[in-house]
Image (cartoon, rainbow, N blue to C red):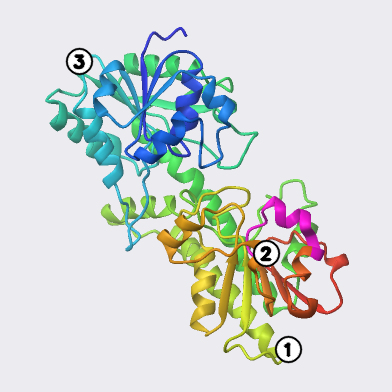
């Protein structure tokens, strides 16, 4: 360790825990979270998200705690609080501002607070700093300093880890920026990019996911168009992808705590400046409508096969927001479930990666164990977890009544050439 700072990490979820563990390999780190159950698990080297291995937790010096007073042992505080949207799709900053107040109450002169949460430009200085000042009685820029370094954690990705992704850093002044850069350089081998201002760094983060959202929205809209032409979208993408500068995006359900949320942060800020975003919100409308579209696709296929939708059974494989993770936040599979139920179909959901209690608590959905699934009229492979992909057609076909019926392969992972003759295959 060359930076000489004592680090704390506030918020030990998908973002905060890998950060705490990385710094904990160098020296003692204070890891604070409001969830006492989470803290107890981490003390036993158990990460319920599956992002950090038990051995990696065990070989770091992280003091896992629920006591904010422990933050006084540190002078460099990293805030990794969640920043979701509310029911009206507006930014919900309550957790972030609550974490800011918690840190502020323990701040001492000379401390630095760096925010990693995804926000719209201006939140750090206009929303968080006043809370820090009010809680601490200190003055920002005189008694303490702030910075912003957007997280780039990709849940389930074992290649693009914290150390291997270029780290964007920013701060309110050059001296603080030097310190922030030195601290992160100690754990990030991919290099540091110094943004000229905090607002630039905030904007950079929010457009990273907005860009991905729009590219996927284009693919989803193409899927809607090509379906009306009876053209397989993935065949089209395979052909177009032979051009050297064609960008390889694919259609699908767009959920999670980043891509499905961040564009609303930017759109909200734009609206406060009397600008109504057109492209950003159009992309969101397309992506938010894909669950309803998939459910309708199932019902139409049943009608073609003479299956009475009233009371028919559909099995949905996968409930997390993406493959091979446990994260249920903002999963759009729930849209498929609710729309099918509106059509009076019975739905059973199976996902080996999901905590059934969490699914029931957050969405009111009971997750069924694999050996308890009843034979269904249709199967939707919504999230291609490795277990589903490895099982391939034999495992999927076994879930249908007499191995006959409808299969919707949302991500196109099943081999079409191996499709059983009595199964109708549909894809996005």
Give the number of the disc on residue 371: 2
Q: Secondary structure at mark 3?
A: loop
Give yes or no for contact between labels 1 and 2 (Cβ–Cβ under 8 Å). Answer: no
Q: Secondary structure at mark 2?
A: helix
Query: Quick check: 349 above or below 193?
Result: below
Q: CA distance from mark 1 to mark 3?
A: 72 Å
Q: CA distance from mark 1 to mark 2?
A: 27 Å
Q: Callout 1 environment at 10 Å: few (<14), some (14 to 19), or many (20+)?
A: few
State the residue position of label 1.
305
| For residue 187, side relative to residue 121 (left or right) | right
Res. 236 image quadrant:
bottom right
Q: Quadrant of the C terminus?
A: bottom right
Which numbered disc, 3 or 2, marks the residue closer to the eye?
A: 2
Q: Secondary structure at mark 1?
A: loop
Which residue does the image show at 50% across and 59% down from the upper left?
A: 331
Q: Callout 3 environment at 10 Å: few (<14), some (14 to 19), or many (20+)?
A: some
Q: Magenta part of the protein: which range?
A: 381-394
| Marked residue nearer the N-terminal end (1 or 2) | 1
| For residue 235, side relative to residue 365 (left or right) | right
């Amino acid at each position: 360790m060359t930076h000489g700072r004592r680090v704390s990490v506030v918020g030990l979820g998908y973002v905060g825990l890998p950060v705490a563990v990385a710094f904990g390999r160098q020296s003692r780190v204070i890891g604070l979270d409001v969830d006492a159950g989470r803290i107890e698990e981490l003390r036993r080297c158990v990460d319920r998200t599956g992002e950090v291995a038990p051995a990696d937790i065990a070989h770091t010096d992280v003091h896992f705690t629920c006591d904010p007073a422990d933050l006084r042992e540190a002078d460099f505080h990293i805030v990794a609080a969640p920043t979701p949207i509310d029911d009206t799709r507006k930014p919900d900053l309550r957790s972030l501002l609550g974490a800011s107040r918690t840190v502020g109450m323990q701040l001492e002169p000379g401390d630095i607070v760096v925010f990693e949460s995804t926000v719209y430009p201006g939140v750090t200085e206009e929303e968080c700093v006043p809370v820090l000042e009010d809680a601490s009685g200190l003055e920002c820029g005189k008694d303490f300093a702030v910075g912003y370094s957007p997280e780039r954690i990709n849940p389930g990705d074992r290649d693009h880890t914290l150390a291997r992704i270029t780290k964007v850093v920013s701060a309110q002044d050059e001296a603080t920026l030097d310190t922030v850069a030195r601290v992160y350089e100690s754990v990030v081998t991919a290099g540091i990019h110094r943004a000229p201002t905090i607002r630039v760094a905030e904007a950079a983060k929010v457009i990273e996911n907005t860009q991905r959202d729009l590219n996927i929205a284009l693919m989803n809209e193409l899927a809607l168009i090509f379906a009306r032409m009876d053209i397989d979208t993935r065949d089209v993408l395979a052909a177009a992808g032979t051009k050297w500068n064609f960008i390889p995006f694919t259609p699908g359900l767009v959920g999670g705590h980043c891509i499905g949320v961040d564009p609303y942060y930017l759109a909200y800020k734009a609206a406060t400046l009397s600008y109504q975003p057109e492209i950003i919100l159009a992309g969101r409308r397309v992506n938010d409508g894909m669950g309803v579209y998939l459910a309708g696709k199932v019902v139409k296929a049943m009608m073609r096969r003479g299956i009475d939708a009233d009371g028919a059974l559909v099995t949905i494989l996968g409930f997390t927001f993406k493959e091979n993770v446990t994260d249920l936040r903002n999963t759009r599979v729930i849209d498929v479930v609710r729309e099918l139920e509106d059509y009076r179909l019975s739905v059973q959901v199976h996902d080996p990666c999901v905590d059934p209690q969490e699914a029931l608590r957050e969405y009111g959905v009971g997750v069924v164990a694999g050996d308890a699934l009843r034979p269904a009229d249709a199967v939707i492979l919504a999230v291609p977890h490795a277990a589903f992909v490895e099982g391939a057609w034999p495992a999927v076909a076994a879930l249908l009544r007499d191995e006959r019926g409808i299969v919707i392969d949302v991500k196109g992972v099943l081999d079409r050439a191996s499709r059983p003759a009595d199964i109708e295959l549909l894809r996005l």
